[in-house]
Image (tube, rainbow, N blue to C red):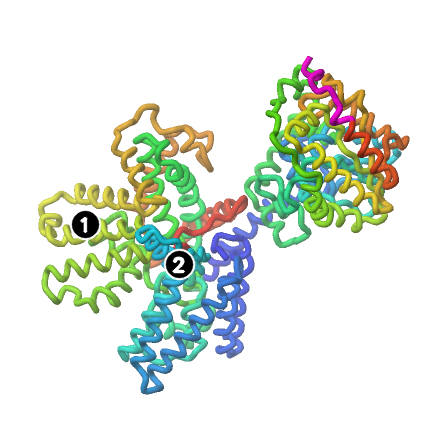
Amino acid sequence: MKKWSTAVICSCLGVFLLLGCFTALIDPFFLYHAPILDRGYLMGRYEEIYYSPGILRSFPYEAAIIGTSMAENSDPGDVERLFGLKTVKATMSAGQPADFRELMSLLHRGTKLVIRAVDMLSNVTAAPEVYRDEPRPGYLYNNNPFDDIEYLLGTDVLERSYETVKRARAGEYSTSLAAYARWSDIYPISKEEALKNYERPELADSTEPADAYLANVREQFERNIKPSLEGYPGTEFYMFNPPVSMLYWDRFTREGKADALLDGYFELMRLCLEYDNVRFFWFDNRELTTDLENYRDQSHYGPEWNTWMFEQMRSGGYEITSGSLEAVKAEFAAFVHGYDYESLFD
Amino acid sequence: MLFNSYIFIFVLLPVSLAGYFLLNRAKFSRPAMAWLCLMSLVFYGWVTPLYLPVICVSIAANYALASAMTLTKHKKAAFAAALAVNLGVLFFYKYYDFFIGNVNRVLKTDLVLLRLLLPLGISFFTFQQLSYVIDVYKGSAPRYKFLDYAAFILFFPQLVAGPICLHSEIIPQFEDAKLKRFNFANFAPGLLAFALGLAKKTLIADQLGAIANLGFAAPDALNTAGALVSMFCYTLQIYFDFSGYSDMATGISLMFNIRQPQNFDSPYRSLTILEFWKRWHMTLTRFFTAYVYFPLGGSRKGTLRTYLNVMAVFVISGFWHGAGWTFILWGFLHGIFSVVTRIFRKTFEERIHPAFNWLLTFGFVNAAWVLFRSESLQSALTFFRRLSALDFAGGIPDALTDVGVFAGQPQIVVLIAIALCVFASVQLKNTNERLANFRPKVSAAISAVILLVLSVLSISGGVSTFLYWNF
């Protein structure tokens, strides 16, 4: 009986150890180390919730580009060229501010620069405790070694480790962070496409009060943004509003929410700019935003504009400061209200 | 905490075993019992510590009232208080909203529902304590040491989903000095039982349950083929889930040198419904027989009274399983079929071919599970309508079977899996039969390793709960 029991337990532990070591060695989601194979990793845009935390944990870098689909077309090579810093991209399509708080908590201590796309809608209107709606692999985000067993012995992760090796041998996929999560190769960008993806809402009967989202924005800041700014005092944060098209403002003007959104967003900028390690860029480039040929829908622009924004950051273009906030807001609100939206549909 | 979780398998179980036997080895038998209680409380409170006070107070109150029955002159009052405490707590947490909901419906009132989270395993630990205080009142139970009593109720293998043990079969084992030493002769079969139970749960019940969940979530979208598959999947899910849990409880207890009463004896082999209830959740049947059926008079007060007593037991059993009309009707139908079987016992046993008896019993049990699983009587009615519509157009709906391990597989795989599971539940030796003839053979070791490895690997990606936790 003793031999039998010992044999069963040792065999099980042996198999678990073997499988766990295999997962740890291949490490398909970079929980422990950067890729050990040239290819086979980074398999899907829709799996950023698995890949991005590992990129921030385990890749070597001095700068990181973080954001939603508005940052997915970014090429870390641009930042490396412009700022001379080794750069990674850790994006999450449709990520909520709470997702980014957790993601940013994984930044290396010595990170010099974080370029952070701050989506207006989610940061102003979403509930601060809301995460992207899918099961979260908590073990990839926390530093609790005890739940790593879910990673080491999870069938899905084991399967992915095996696939990674198989794909690497077949020369498929790469570890290129420029290609990681990039959608511009998949979706066409044109005025026709932008209008096709836009459903114009009916005119609302009422207008939301300008302060409708202020309390939410402040809570959002306290809970999901402030911890990163205070947690990494030695890191410079270049935050920016992704420059959405005028279709976006057509929607929210018609829905009676434009002023409330603007009030909320400018409040968020004001709160961020209270920190010395923050620079905020308000990319109000009307050549871009009024020309739907640059977009695939109301918000998403082509990859050349990601490069353009990095160049502006480098030169200090479109930077907004605490002193200029109110004037910029008043001018932009007047532009939003006075714009001839019908011209977009010509 | 769940048996099918990493924290239980890799931490709580080995730590509990090691602590218990090391303390006993050092002759610290009382601290060993305290350790067992502590580990059981960790197990119970792991997910939500909210109800730890409920179970602790319940244990203390029952022990105090049982002591009052033996040590003071207020035996009757203490007994009445014990019944009131146990039934009151059970009613408050499990049945209050059901009653108020019905009162609101009938009297058109608007009384507030409590919407309380049901404390895990409350029906099980309440029944175990009820059996003890009733036995103390009858004078057939001694006054145990508090730690032994607490360990009897809290003992984590049985705490949240049974078996419903009697004090007389567990506490003497705790007190037996010979059973306080680690024993491979118990550990080895215990390990095999745990492996079998874990595999039943994770590799069979959860997979078939995924199909059943989809089918019962939207019965109006089913055709007859889909309804049949959903029904069979649930019938198999509930058996492999609950008997899997019982196997694990048996196995873990054996590792502690404690023998649990058998809870399942291949119930789907049964040729009559009377036999089914001797094989399904045997410790519950035993409880109701001893503490409801016999006190009502059993079969000693004439035929009609016997049948009424049988009906009472089954309706109460239905209500015990859940505070809802579907459960009550489920119990009622089992009662009716049991009475009919008793009336025509000779016909069933002597004139009808066993194969037909089996089909009749298995068919009835399947149909009754539909009631048990449905969200409401309306939903059950819809399910039965789809089942009897004889609408096989398009075969089994693809959306029903494209889930879990069956995703992307041809539907014949699902049908083969159902057939194999029915065969296994009827024809293969059950865990208790395997334990009775356990020999430390290589083949058993290989089976145990394969089952444990596959089961543990399948735990990740969302740990599922056991069905009987809700009861």
Chain letter belonging to callout 1: B
Callout 1 environment at 10 Å: few (<14), some (14 to 19), or many (20+)? some
The magenta span reads: A335-346
Residue tagged 2: B161
Q: Is residue A59 visible?
A: yes
* The quadrant where residue A128 appears: top right
Residue B271, image x and y in percent?
20, 48
Q: Looking at the picture, does residue A6 appear above or below residue A236? A: below
Whole-number angstrom distance, CA of label 1 to CA of label 2: 26 Å
**Left or right: residue B66 compared with residue A240:** left
Q: Looking at the picture, does residue B424 appear above or below residue A252? A: below
Residue at the image point whose x is 69% and y is 17% from the top: A342
Residue at the image point whose x is 78% and y is 28% from the top: A334
Q: Which mark is residue A43?
A: none
Q: Is residue A299 visible?
A: no
Residue at the image point whose x is 12% and y is 52% from the top: B345
- Asked if badges 1 and 2 are on one and the same chain, I answer yes
Tell me if residue A337 is in the magenta stretch: yes
Q: Which mark is residue B337?
A: 1
Residue A322, image x and y in percent?
86, 41
Residue A77, image x and y in percent?
81, 29
* The quadrant where residue B126 appears: bottom left
Instruction: Say what amino acid the circle numbered 1 marks.
Output: Phe
Q: Looking at the picture, does residue A223 appear above or below residue B172? A: above
Which quadrant does the C terminus of chain B fall into? bottom left
Residue at the image point whose x is 43% and y is 30% from the top: B399
